[in-house]
Image (cartoon, rainbow, N blue to C red):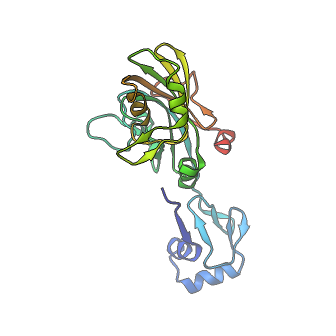
């Protein structure tokens, strides 16, 4: 998602329905504030969540929203779908406007999904060079062995894309379960990595993004707003 910006004079001319020449006079009279600060420049670049006021009266006050969702299996990471329920369908209708998904999960993968209307935040969070860690609980059809660990750590070559995966951490929890931490998200990456060992993934659950852990008391299909501390930490 790209960050939405607009010139202040264009916003004021449209919102106040006055010509640009009059907008200039309003600005020079110190009548306009952006996030509480007086702004006089015609070409000032407004971000989509900047609060703009005229003589102390708010003209625009959109606020960024950041939401944690516990996605169940069978729900798609999409805003619309003609067949399956979507992540947005899990929220009340009044909460859905303007939201987009940060880091999708497959139909048969459960766990932590983030929703926001803040494109700057989501772009920074998902930027490949930021290497934000994602943690998954994986259930396998066949027993695991210690041979998997160095292969995940060293990366695997995917011939179709011509790329080698970045180092991933694999921790064996039980004969059929492992915890995997990735810092990237290639197409069906975890399933394809275990596929190298001819060991099908029968269950996949994302438990963490960065240092944000899915609430243990948040049932599948439920959601909540992130705290300011969680937003800043991510």
Q: Nearer the viewer, residue 152 or 42?
A: 152
Q: Nearer the viewer, residue 129 or 9?
A: 129
Q: Please name the residue shown 67% across and 42% down the image.
A: 233
- Quadrant housing the C terminus: top right
**Residue 140, how many percent across, how many down?**
42, 19
Is 177 situated above or below 56?
A: above
33 left or right of 184? right
Q: Please name the residue shown 39% across and 37% down the image.
A: 188
Residue 173: quarter of image: top right
User: Can residue 117 be seen in this snapshot?
Assistant: yes
Q: Nearer the viewer, residue 163 or 211?
A: 163
**Residue 159, how many percent across, how many down?**
37, 44
Q: Please name the residue shown 34% across and 45% down the image.
A: 160
Q: Please name the residue shown 63% across and 61% down the image.
A: 51
Residue 183: quarter of image: top right
**Residue 219, how many percent across, how many down?**
50, 23
């Amino acid at each position: 998602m790209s960050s939405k910006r607009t010139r202040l004079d264009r916003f004021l001319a449209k919102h106040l329905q006055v010509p640009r020449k009059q907008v200039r006079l309003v600005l020079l009279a110190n009548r306009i504030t952006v996030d509480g600060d007086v702004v006089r420049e015609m070409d000032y670049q407004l971000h989509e969540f900047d609060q703009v006021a005229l003589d102390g009266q708010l003209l625009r006050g959109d606020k960024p929203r950041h939401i944690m969702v516990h996605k169940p299996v069978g729900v798609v990471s999409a805003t619309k779908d003609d067949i399956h329920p979507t992540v947005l369908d899990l929220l009340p209708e009044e909460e859905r406007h303007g939201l987009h998904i940060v880091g999708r999960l497959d139909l048969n993968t459960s766990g932590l999904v983030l929703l926001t209307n803040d494109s700057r935040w989501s772009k920074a969070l998902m930027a490949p060079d930021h290497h934000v860690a994602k943690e998954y609980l994986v259930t396998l059809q066949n027993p695991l062995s210690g041979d998997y660990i160095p292969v995940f750590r060293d990366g695997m070559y995917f011939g179709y894309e011509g790329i080698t995966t970045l180092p991933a951490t694999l921790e064996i929890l039980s004969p059929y379960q492992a915890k995997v931490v990735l810092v990237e998200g290639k197409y069906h990456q975890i399933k394809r990595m275990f596929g190298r060992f001819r060991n099908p993934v029968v269950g996949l659950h994302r438990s963490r993004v960065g240092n944000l852990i899915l609430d243990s008391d948040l049932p599948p299909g439920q959601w909540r707003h992130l705290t300011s501390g969680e937003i800043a930490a991510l």
